[in-house]
Image (spheres, rainbow, N blue to C red):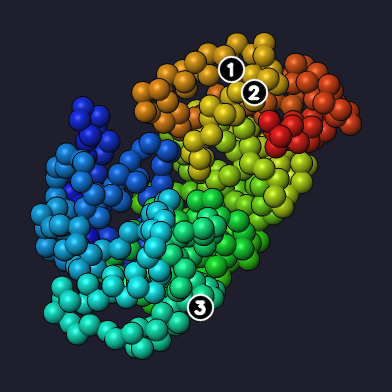
C-alpha cells in the first residue's frame, strides 16, 4: 500500500528527515516513536502534502507517486491526517465541514455526492463511535472545544471519511484518561481494515481487542526485542518497554513515568509506586537511552536547579540542553546515567535533595517521603 524509500525533508539548511524507509501494508498499524524534534510530525506533513519542505526520495500509495500529487489529490486518494494540535475554524459548523469534505472526495473519485439527510445518518453512526452528542454537529469546527473534544472530532472525521491511509500525529497528546478511552474505542471501531498488533497494559481499562502486557512479557517490533516492566505511578497500570539483548545503548520507552530531569504527575499511583518504578529504571545499564514522551527537559531542569543548586552535572546538562533547544534540536533521548546524575526524583538519597525536601516539610528522610515532598512542590512550581 504505502512505500517510502530514502525520504528526505529539509527546511532551508535544516535537514529533518534523513533517508527514511518504510513499507506499510494494507491492514497494518505502525507506531512511529522518537523524541520531540526527530521528524515524526514532519513525516506526517510530508505524506499529507504540506508545503514548505524540500523533499527527496520516493513515496508511493498503491504504486502511485504521492509526492507529485497536490494535498487535495492525496485526500481523494485516501490520505487522512489527524493533527497533533487540531485547528479551530470559527463560523464553519461541523455538519457543513464534514459533508463538504466527504463530498469533495466523492466528487474527485467520480462518485455521487451524498445528500443532507443521508449524510446525517452517516454522521450519527460515526458520532456513536466517539461518544459525541449530536449538538456537536451544530458547533463551529473545534471552536471552544476541549483538548479531548478536538481529538474526538479528529476521529469523527476519520470515521466519516473512511480513508485508505490514516496518519495520526500524537492523537493521545494532552488527553485525560476518559478521553483516551473514547479515542481508543473510536480507533478500535475502525480496525476491521487494520490487522496489525496493538499492545497495551493489562492493568489499564482499554477497549479490546489488544494484546495485554505486563511485567516479564516480550514483544518483537521492527526486528527489536523488548521486555515489559510494570511502572505504576503516573497511572495505576503504566508499563515501559526495555530493549533486550542490545550490545550497547539499549532503548527504554518509559512513557510518562520518567522524563529527563523529572517524572510524571501522580494521577492514579502513589509516591511509593513511583519510587519503585524509578528504581527499576535506575537498575538498568547507565548507557540505556531514555525515550520519554514529552520534551519537558528545560522546565524540569529549572526545577532541578531549585532542588539541588549545587549539582554541577545538572548545571552542565542544563547549559547543553539550552543550546540544543535554541538550535531547534531535541534534548532527547537522555540516558539512565544522565538521569542518575541530574534528576532529583532519582536522587532522593542525595544530601542536598534531602535538605530541600526537609525544608518543604517532608515526613522524614526516606526516599518515598523525599519524593512525595518534591512531587507536591513540582505540581505548584
The location of residue 127, given as percent across then percent down, is 47, 76
Residue name at image x 41 percent, y 59 percent = 90
- Marks 1/2 in contact by CB < 8 Å: the verdict is yes
Q: Residue furthest front?
A: 91
Q: Quadrant of residue 355?
A: top right
Residue name at image x 63 percent, y 37 percent = 263
The location of residue 6, given as percent across then percent down, is 18, 44
**Disc 1 designates what residue?**
314
- The residues tagged by marks 3 and 2 sit, at their Cα atoms, a distance apart of 47 Å
Residue 56 relative to residue 129: left or right: left
Residue name at image x 47 percent, y 22 percent = 321
- The residues tagged by marks 1 and 2 sit, at their Cα atoms, a distance apart of 8 Å
Eyeballing the image, is 166 above or below 280? below
Q: Residue 134 carries which label?
A: 3
Which element is circle 1 on?
helix
Which element is circle 2 on?
helix
Q: Quadrant of residue 180?
A: bottom right
> Is disc 2 surrounded by few (<14), some (14 to 19) or many (20+) residues within 10 Å?
many
Q: Which residue lies furthest to the right in this view?
A: 363
Q: Please name which of the two marks, 3 or 2, marks the residue nearer to the observer.
A: 3
Eyeballing the image, is 54 above or below 110? above
Which element is circle 3 on?
helix
Residue name at image x 53 percent, y 34 percent = 296
Q: Which mark is residue 304?
A: 2
Determine if residue 342 is in view.
Answer: yes
- Marks 3/2 in contact by CB < 8 Å: the verdict is no
Front position in the image: 378 or 281: 378
> Is disc 1 surrounded by few (<14), some (14 to 19) or many (20+) residues within 10 Å?
many
Amino acid at each position: 500500500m504505502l512505500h517510502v524509500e530514502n525520504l528526505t525533508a529539509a527546511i532551508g539548511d535544516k535537514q529533518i528527515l534523513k533517508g527514511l524507509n518504510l513499507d506499510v501494508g494494507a491492514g497494518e498499524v505502525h507506531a512511529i516513536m522518537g523524541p520531540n524534534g526527530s521528524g515524526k510530525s514532519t513525516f506526517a506533513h510530508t505524506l499529507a502534502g504540506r508545503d514548505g519542505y524540500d523533499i527527496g526520495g520516493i513515496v508511493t500509495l498503491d504504486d502511485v507517486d504521492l509526492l507529485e500529487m497536490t494535498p487535495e489529490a492525496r485526500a481523494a486518494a485516501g490520505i487522512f491526517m489527524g493533527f497533533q494540535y487540531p485547528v479551530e475554524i470559527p463560523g464553519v459548523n461541523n455538519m457543513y465541514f464534514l459533508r463538504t469534505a466527504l463530498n469533495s472526495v466523492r466528487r474527485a473519485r467520480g462518485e455521487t455526492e451524498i445528500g443532507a439527510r443521508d449524510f446525517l445518518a452517516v454522521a450519527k453512526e460515526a458520532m456513536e463511535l466517539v461518544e459525541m452528542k449530536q449538538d456537536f454537529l451544530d458547533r463551529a469546527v473545534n471552536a471552544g472545544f476541549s483538548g479531548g473534544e478536538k481529538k474526538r472530532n479528529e476521529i469523527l472525521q476519520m470515521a466519516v471519511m473512511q480513508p485508505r491511509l490514516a496518519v495520526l500525529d500524537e492523537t493521545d497528546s494532552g488527553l485525560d484518561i476518559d478521553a483516551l478511552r473514547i479515542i481508543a474505542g473510536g480507533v478500535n471501531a475502525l480496525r476491521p481494515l487494520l490487522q496489525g498488533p496493538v499492545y497495551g497494559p493489562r492493568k489499564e481499562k482499554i477497549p479490546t481487542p489488544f494484546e495485554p502486557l505486563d511485567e516479564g512479557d516480550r514483544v518483537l517490533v521492527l526486528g527489536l526485542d523488548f521486555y515489559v516492566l510494570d511502572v505504576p505511578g503516573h497511572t495505576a497500570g503504566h508499563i515501559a518497554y526495555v530493549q533486550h539483548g542490545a550490545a550497547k545503548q539499549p532503548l527504554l520507552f518509559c512513557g510518562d513515568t520518567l522524563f529527563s530531569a523529572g517524572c510524571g504527575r501522580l494521577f492514579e499511583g502513589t509516591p511509593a509506586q513511583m519510587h519503585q518504578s524509578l528504581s527499576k529504571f535506575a537498575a538498568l545499564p547507565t548507557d540505556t537511552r531514555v525515550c520519554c514522551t514529552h520534551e519537558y527537559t528545560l522546565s524540569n531542569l529549572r526545577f532541578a536547579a531549585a532542588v539541588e543548586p549545587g549539582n554541577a552535572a545538572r548545571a552542565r546538562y542544563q547549559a547543553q540542553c539550552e543550546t540544543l533547544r535554541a538550535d531547534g534540536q531535541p534534548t532527547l533521548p537522555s540516558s539512565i546515567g544522565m538521569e542518575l546524575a541530574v534528576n532529583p526524583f532519582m536522587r532522593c538519597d542525595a544530601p542536598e535533595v534531602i535538605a530541600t525536601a526537609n525544608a518543604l516539610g517532608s515526613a522524614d528522610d526516606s526516599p518515598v517521603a523525599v519524593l512525595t515532598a518534591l512531587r507536591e512542590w513540582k505540581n505548584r512550581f
